[in-house]
Image (cartoon, rainbow, N blue to C red):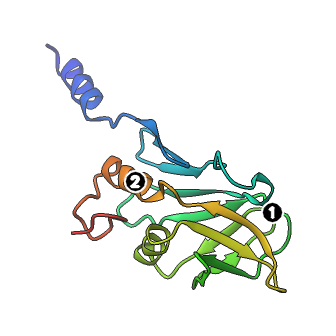
Amino acid sequence: MSMLALLLATAAQAAPAPAEPRVFRDWIAGCDNTRFCTAVALFPESGDSEAALTASLTRGGEANAAPVLTIHRVPRRPARLLADGRAVTARLSGDEDVVATFADGATLARTLRGARTLRLEDAQGRAIGDVSLAGVAAAMLFIDEAQGRLGTATALVRTG
């Protein structure tokens, strides 16, 4: 085998393969061949679809990549975010797509794992819409595994 053929064969074996997308209750998650992962909240099969919002959780494969939570197609300006009725400490930015910025990945993960629903409210305290969190913990675990983070300090679910 020539040196070039050996290098090409080694490079092909070392290239990460995309993870097959998986559904976890109301969330679907997948990763590309650079280990960039996205989990998307689906509209729940049961409940009020008029009040339902969708969201995505993305995270790059780099060691220091922060997870980003985006709530999509928000019909009016939100003032606060609640998890199961409790106020969440996150900065909300954006107009139609609202990015919720948390202090760190651990805070974001703790907020999402420990709740069933995220709710956006306007400045008058009226509900704008809800995001189902059913399955989000499993989706985050899938991302941690696909990115090789399980058991590390940067894992969202099973930190080490």
Mark 1 or 2, closer to the camera: 2
The x and y percentages for residue 136 are 48, 57
The x and y percentages for residue 104 are 45, 78
66 or 130, which is in the foreground? 130
Query: Viewed as shown, does residue 143 lie left or right of 70?
Result: left
The image quadrant that residue 131 belongs to is bottom right
Query: Viewed as shown, does residue 21 lie left or right of 70?
Result: left
The x and y percentages for residue 75 are 85, 64
**Where 42 falls versus 151 (above or below)?**
above
Q: At numbered mark 2, what does the secondary structure look like: helix, strand or loop?
A: helix
Circle 2 packing at 10 Å, graded few (<14), some (14-19), many (20+), is some
The image quadrant that residue 160 belongs to is bottom left
Identify the residue position indicated by label 2 in the image.
138
Identify the residue position indicated by label 1 in the image.
96
Query: Residue, x 69% and y 54% (percent of image)?
Result: 47
Query: Residue, x 41% and y 35% (percent of image)?
Result: 18
12 or 133, which is in the foreground? 133
Query: Residue, x 46% and y 56% (percent of image)?
Result: 60
153 or 107, which is in the foreground? 107
Circle 1 packing at 10 Å, graded few (<14), some (14-19), many (20+), is some
The image quadrant that residue 96 belongs to is bottom right
Q: At numbered mark 1, what does the secondary structure look like: helix, strand or loop?
A: loop
Dot label at residue 57:
none
Which residue of the protein is positioned furthest toward the top in this rendering? 1
Q: Earlier in the sequence, mark 1 or mark 2?
A: 1
154 or 108, which is in the foreground? 108
- Check disc 2 and give the amino acid type: Ala
- Check disc 1 and give the amino acid type: Glu
The x and y percentages for residue 15 are 32, 35
**Where 148 falls versus 99 (above or below)?**
above
